[in-house]
């Protein structure tokens, strides 16, 4: 039985805190502007991030301190966010107008991305996480044309049934976001999610997911302390997956992999060479398209959790 969270998980808060810090970092580090991240985290953390906005030296110090203390996990998250944002923009530019975020946590894309203006957007997560977002962002308009915070009990409900009840259009191409979730799931739950997403996707849909290679993507570096921290936080690491296995699974379910990038590639894309050494391979981002003729409805239970 998974631990029940009344609000956002510890990892969701940490992700939002890192986003807030990066949003207030000096140029050229601030590659993502998320003015809502600081509002979604405990006030002292938000205040710490915001005071660096007008103090470049302090911003550089915070950036490098977080990178050191988190073994570059903080920089990985900033780069990952920028890569996903660009992937969403590219998909929307092709005319996709439906977005689903699985395990949305404290993701604020619906509020901060103007490209979502013509879209219907569905965020799936536990009611407690949604309640915090609704309370702390009250009064701020969403960018998406239609926005639904869809509550789900991942132990008892399927993605298909809650989306159908929220007005999801199975015939419309969709961009699916599954960020920072799979690492906490069992391999069987990951497979079920692939199956469900493929079956609910019309041709032309895009699936964007982060995944964590074996040993947390750290090669031969010790990772036991990170695993222990995750377990103490109530979110044990269970879903590491080798690239070859992931690609085989996606292909089996009708996906065509378009890209599969690492933090090193993201750093080369977004940051100056002087900062490339802060990129470390904690995870990868795979972007895949649904091949025509492969999609179809399902009621398979996909045990997705929280992210973002």
Image: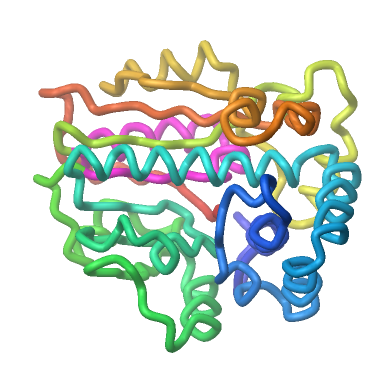
Is 48 rendered above or below residue 253? Answer: below
Expressed as whole percent of the image width and height from the top left, the position of residue 34 reads 56, 62
Q: Is residue 177 left or right of residue 11?
A: left
- Count of numbered circles on the image: 0
Quadrant the C terminus occupies = bottom right
Q: Is residue 19 visible?
A: yes
Q: x, y percentage for residue 91?
A: 29, 39
Q: Nearer the viewer, residue 228 or 188?
A: 228
Left/right of residue 197 with respect to residue 214 in the rendered view: left
Query: To which quarter of the image does residue 150 belong?
Result: bottom left
Residue at position x 30%, y 19% from top? 256
* Residue 232 position within the rendered picture, expressed as x and y whole percent measured from the top left: 82, 54
Tell me which corner region of the image, top left, top right, bottom left or bottom right, holds residue 181.
Answer: top right
Q: Residue 218 magenta-drawn?
A: no
Magenta range is 174-201
* 108 to 44, vertically: above or below: above
- 22, above or below 227, in the image: below
Instruction: Name which residue lies at 55% across and 16% down.
Output: 243
* Residue drawn 19% across the image and 58% down it: 168
Magenta stretch: helix, strand or loop mostly: helix
Image spot of residue 83 (x, y percent): 51, 38
The color scheme shown is rainbow
At a point 23% along the width and 69% down the height, the residue shown is 146
Residue 124 seen: no
Q: Nearer the viewer, residue 300 or 131?
A: 131
Q: Which quarter of the rendering shows the N terminus?
A: bottom right
Quarter of the figure with residue 14: bottom right
Q: Is residue 270 left or right of residue 225?
A: left
């Amino acid at each position: 039985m998974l631990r029940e969270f009344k609000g956002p998980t510890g990892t969701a808060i940490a992700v939002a805190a890192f986003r807030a810090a990066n949003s207030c970092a000096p140029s050229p580090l601030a590659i993502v502007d998320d003015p809502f991240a600081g509002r979604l985290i405990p006030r002292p953390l938000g205040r710490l991030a915001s005071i660096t906005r007008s103090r470049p030296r302090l911003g550089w110090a915070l950036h490098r301190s977080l990178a050191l203390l988190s073994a570059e996990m903080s920089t990985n998250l900033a780069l990952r966010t920028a890569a996903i944002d660009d992937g969403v923009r590219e998909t929307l530019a092709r005319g996709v107008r439906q977005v689903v975020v699985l395990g949305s946590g404290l993701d604020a894309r619906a509020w901060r991305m103007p490209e979502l203006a013509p879209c219907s957007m569905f965020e799936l997560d536990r009611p407690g996480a949604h309640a915090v977002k609704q309370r702390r962002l009250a009064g701020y308009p969403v960018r998406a044309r239609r926005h639904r915070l869809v509550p789900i009990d991942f132990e008892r409900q399927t993605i298909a049934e809650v989306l159908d009840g929220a007005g999801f259009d199975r015939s419309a191409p969709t961009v699916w976001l599954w960020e920072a979730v799979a690492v906490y799931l069992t391999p069987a739950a990951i497979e079920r999610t692939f199956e469900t997403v493929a079956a609910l996707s019309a041709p032309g849909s895009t699936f964007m997911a982060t995944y964590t290679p074996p040993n947390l993507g750290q090669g031969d570096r010790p990772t036991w302390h990170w695993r222990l921290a995750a377990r103490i936080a109530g979110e044990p690491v269970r879903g590491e997956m080798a690239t070859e296995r992931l690609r085989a699974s996606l292909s089996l379910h009708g996906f065509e992999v378009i890209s599969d990038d690492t933090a090193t590639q993201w750093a080369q894309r977004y940051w100056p060479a002087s900062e490339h050494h802060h990129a470390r391979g904690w995870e990868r981002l795979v972007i895949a398209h649904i091949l025509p003729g492969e999609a179809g409805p399902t009621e398979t239970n996909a045990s997705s959790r929280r992210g973002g």
